[in-house]
Every structure is written in structure tokens, then in C-alpha cells.
Amino acid sequence: MTFASLGLSEPLLRAIAELSYQTPTAVQLAAIPAILHGRDVWASAQTGSGKTAAFVLPILQRLSAAPRESSDVRALVLVPTRELARQIEDAGRRLQRYLPSSLKVCVAVGGVSINPQLMALRGGADLLVATPGRLLDLVANNAARLASLEILVLDEADRLFSQGFAETLSEVLGLLPADCQKLLFSATFPEQVSELAERLLDRPERIAVDAGPTPSASFIDQRVLEVDTRTRTPLLRRLLETHDWPSVLVFVASRHGVDHLTSKLTRASVSALPLHGELSQGARAQALEDLKALRVRVVVATDLAARGLDVAGLSAVINYDLPRSPTDYAHRIGRTGRAGEHGVAISFVTADTAEHFRLIEKRNRLALVREQLAGFEPTDAPRARLPAPGLDPNGGVKGKRKSKKDKRREAANK
């Protein structure tokens, strides 16, 4: 199957070819025709599956078929993070470049001044990509009018709920016309998302793709390196010295850990920048742009960057700290090996995290070979777990410590 066979227009096909899209992914094959025909869509699609183009392409085609006649927003994409919003906005701008009449694509996210966004929305917008809270701010300022909305997309709906947007999302949905086309994309379907889909969608096209851990897993060389906790940084430096990866994303568990590791790499003359939630939106955007443009080789990030980011040609992902969940592992490594390109994902496993990584493997249906790099062979043993309060080391229940009064009473009764 080709993109042309899906019913897309010549200007969009020209943009697709210029962006080197090869053949449609599974979610694109299923979603594009359904959206073009005006169907509601309920899609299960993992990050990296091509879902952004799956809804952006048919939305652009439908919007370009008729000019904007009011100052209302015509199509709205709601997302959980600023980074994902900017990625979708960028995709919209790139894919619509050859349409005969240019569509107005805007982005609205928090963490930056609202004034430029108010100005950008003067006269309305064809496609608005927004985070829920900032959208409500714009509605309150009468800058985003939704009464005539034609298409709504909820992207990464599971994260919209897990990140506490349930109440805000409900408020947004109350502002929308009942007859607009609705598209829901989610990697997982917890109870809240399923209930929303049943309530919101009208006889939707059900799409389920990618039962595996990541859509591009076959293009990712997944490796596991056993190492002691204290030698992870020297091992990371050795890997950077011995591999010619032009762009590397290193995941660390905490903001403090990101700053600490970035400082160590910089002192070792490694070009590195941090990426975490305490940075300004401008600094975060700049770090990603520098990584994409190869102006910096390494970005050290928290799980803020695990979903929604698309760094074309990212060479490697390194789990310096293991992710908290098997799902987070899939999202992390899915930053590389995208769009048919090959990538590498390396996880550092210590004595204390070995059991956790076995769980990650089990849930993702993996069985990865443990490796050791010469000079970095681990010597640590797992730390013994302390017995829980009230238990002795052998598992027996410990009694309360006896008082002197109790001891005297026992002696008197003997």
C-alpha cells in the first residue's frame, strides 16, 4: 500500500515524499481513510507508530477543502505535554506546505507568556494544538472560540488522565459542539479512557495496532550492560568515546541526577545539555533543537522526554537509571529506531536493579543477554533487605520490648 492509495491529495503526497516517508504504517493505513470519511476513531497506538501523521494528514486535507469562514478554531488537538504539542505543530506546518491555500496552524502551551498566543489566534485558526490548561486560559480571554469546531483529537489520552487533566478535560469537552468529529489516540486504555471513549465517540472506527512493546522494536538493538553504580559515569564516557553516535539521549531518574551527570560530562569535554521540568520552556526547546541540529551530542533527560519527542535519526538511548515501569521502558527506547532507521538502546543494570530489569523484560516479552565491558566488570553484591518492623530476620514475629515492670512481674510469678 502507498500513501496515494489512501486518498490523499497531490500536495500532501508531495510533502510526504519530500519528508522521506516511505510506506504508510499500520495505524496510518487504518486511520487515514476513516478520518477522511468523517468517522470517529478510537485508536490504540504506541509512540513511534506514526500516529501524528495518521491524524494530521487527513485533517489537513479536510480543512483545505473549504476556506475558514469565521474566527472559530476548526480543528483542535489536545495533548498532555508542551513537547508533544510543538512536535505536532511542526508536523502540521511541514505537511501543509504545498497546499494551494495555506492553513493557519497554531500552538498553545503553558510555561511561556500567553500574549504571543493571544496575538497568533486573532482571526481564528484552522488547526490549534494545545495543552488543556492553556486552552482554557485562551477561551477565558475570548481568543480561542470552539463553538464551530469541526474536528477534535485527544492524543495520548491515557497521559491526559494520568497527569491530572481529567477535570480540565471535562471542562473543555463541555465547550465543544456535539456534532464535531472526534478522534481518540491512546497507548493504553485505563478505565477512565475507556469510559470517555464510550461516552464521547459516535460509532467509532476501532483501530488496534502494535501489540508488542514498541512499533519499531525490530529496528532497535537493545543491549544490557552490567555495571556497578559508582562506575556508570565512566562507562558512559567510554561508550561515547568508542561509538560514533552523533546524537544520544541519556535517561536519569531525577532532576538533580540530570544536572549532576550533565556537569560531569561537560567537565569531561562531552557536549551535553540537561532536559527536565524545572527548566524554562525556552531552555527545553533549545536543548532539543540543538540535539536535532547536532550542535550538542548528548541530552541528559528525565522521563519528561520519554513520550512525544521526535528527534529524527537519534542514534542511541541510554538508560543510565532504569525507568520506573515496563511501559516507560518502551517509551524511552522508542525515541530511537524510528521511521525505519536503526538505533541502539543500552540499559545499565546494577546489582540492586537486576530484579527490576527482569520485571521490565517479562512485561515487554524480552530476553536480553547481559554483557560486561572490559574494565567495568561489576563487583557489588545486592544489598540485603532489612526486615520489616515487627519481624525478625527469619520471618518470625517479634514481640514488643519488655519493660522493667513486666520483667519484675514475670520474676515474681516464677
Image (cartoon, rainbow, N blue to C red):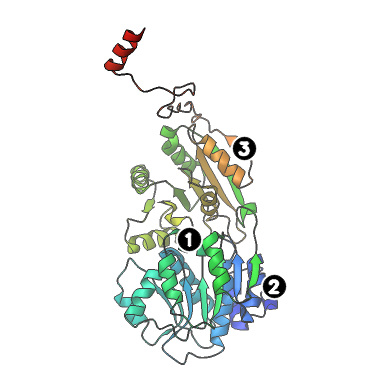
Q: Residue furthest bottom?
A: 69
Residue 369: assigned label:
3
Q: Position of residue 32 (x, y in %)?
A: 63, 75
Q: Is residue 25 visible?
A: no
Q: How many marks?
A: 3
Per the model, the C-alpha gap separating discs 2 and 3 is 38 Å
Per the model, the C-alpha gap separating discs 1 and 2 is 31 Å
Q: Position of residue 364 (x, y in %)?
A: 61, 47
Amino acid type of the residue that numbered disc 2 sits on in the rendered structure: Thr
Residue 191 sits above or below residue 73 on the image: above
Per the model, the C-alpha gap separating discs 3 and 1 is 32 Å
Q: Residue at x 49, y 46 (%)?
A: 318
From the image, tell me which residue sits under label 2. Answer: 2
Mark 3 secondary-structure assignment: loop
Dot 1 surroundings within 10 Å: few (below 14), some, or many (20 or more)?
A: some
> Which mark sits nearer the N-terminus, 2 or 3?
2
Q: Residue furthest top?
A: 414
Q: Residue at x 63, y 74 (%)?
A: 204
Judge by depth and name the residue closer to the eye, 123 or 345: 123
